[in-house]
Image (cartoon, rainbow, N blue to C red):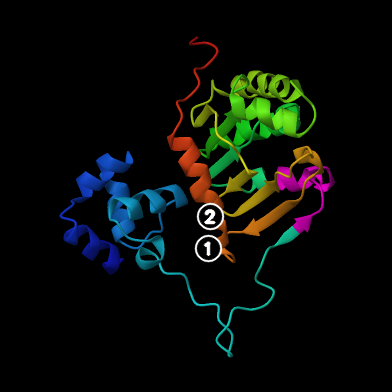
Amino acid sequence: MNAVLRKALAAAQLTETDVAAHLGVDPKTVRRWLSGQRPYPRHRWALAELLRTNQESLWPEPSRENEHGSAPQSEHVHRLYAHRWQVPREVWYDLFSEAEQEIGILVYSGLFLADDAGILELLRARARDGVNVRILLGEPESEPVRQRGEDEQIGGTLSARASNALLLFRTLLDIDGVEIRTHSTVLYNSVYLTEKRLLVNQHVYGLPAAKSPVVEIDRALFFNMAGIYIRSFENVWRGHDPCKSPKKS
């Protein structure tokens, strides 16, 4: 039982039904959380915000300190790639295929994924298996996308890539569990996440994302570091509306 969470709800004078309504989940789900089940990351973040506390106090992480009282020196990142183009396709495929709960993609275009029929089919299959797939693409005509194209010295090419990616990704909208939103946010990195791992593609001024570094982060090992990027994803997600399915437009 999560006694800390139960006490926090009582202090906030919130019932299971109140929490369920605020987070958009079933009250039975909240009861499972109170019984000790760990919520999805986005629900942990939202619940901590609702209760005006931090996630660590509600779901403390096991200590990983060594006998000298400090974190192991190896606890930084899982893997590093100097350029995104060096990340093997199987790494992307494994990232998404291993997801059991959620897949999140936050990019300006992500055309290298949208143009890969195998990756699209994999996302479709994972959604059919009950994985929640959320995709955030840059609004093609937005100022941040235009400016990023200028920064990469490719002019309007990025806007065109964002438009193409949106058309390709939208073919997934006929599957329950897939949601796509467009954003007009200035991104400092692209984020690809599941409940297990993240791939974070840095944005370097004057270079396209394909030539910029990628950091792979194991969420179980590097909880706090992963949380920074997850919060960024959720902030962008909450600020934008979903795209309509082609069949409904």
Residue 109 visible in this rendered orientation of the protein: no
Magenta part of the protein: which range? 80-94
- Residue under the image location 32 percent in, 42 percent down: 23
Res. 184 image quadrant:
top right
Q: Residues within 10 Å of mark 1 (few under 14, many from 20)?
A: few
The residue at which mark 1 appears reads as 224
Query: Residue 237: percent from the left, percent from the top?
Result: 48, 36
Q: Residue at x 54, y 20 (%)?
A: 174
Q: Position of residue 46 (x, y in %)?
A: 37, 48
For residue 118, the mark is none
Q: Nearer the viewer, residue 184 or 143?
A: 143
Considering only vertical position in the picture, is 40 above or below 89? Answer: below
SS at mark 2? helix
Label 2 environment density (alpha carbons within 10 Å; few <14, some 14–19, many ≥20)? few
Residue with the mark numbered 2: 228
Q: Residue furthest right?
A: 86
User: In this view of the protein, can residue 187 be seen by the observer?
Assistant: yes
User: How far from the left and from the top, in percent, is residue 40?
Assistant: 44, 51
Q: Main secondary structure of the magenta part?
A: helix
Split into 4 quadrants, where in the image is the N terminus? bottom left
Total numbered badges shown on the rendered structure: 2
Q: Amino acid at mark 2?
A: Ile
Q: Is residue 215 magenta?
A: no
Q: Do residues under tags 2 and 1 come within 8 Å of each other at their CB atoms?
A: yes
Could you tell whether 157 is left or right of 173 in the image? Answer: right
Query: Looking at the picture, which amino acid does disc 1 mark?
Result: Asn
Query: Considering depth in this image, is 226 or 247 the residue closer to the camera?
Result: 226
Relative to residue 27, is residue 243 depicted above or below?
Answer: above
Residue 136 in percent (x, y) is at 56, 32
Question: SS class of the residue under badge 1?
Answer: helix
* Horizontal relation, residue 208 to residue 171: left or right: right
CA separation, marks 2 and 1?
7 Å
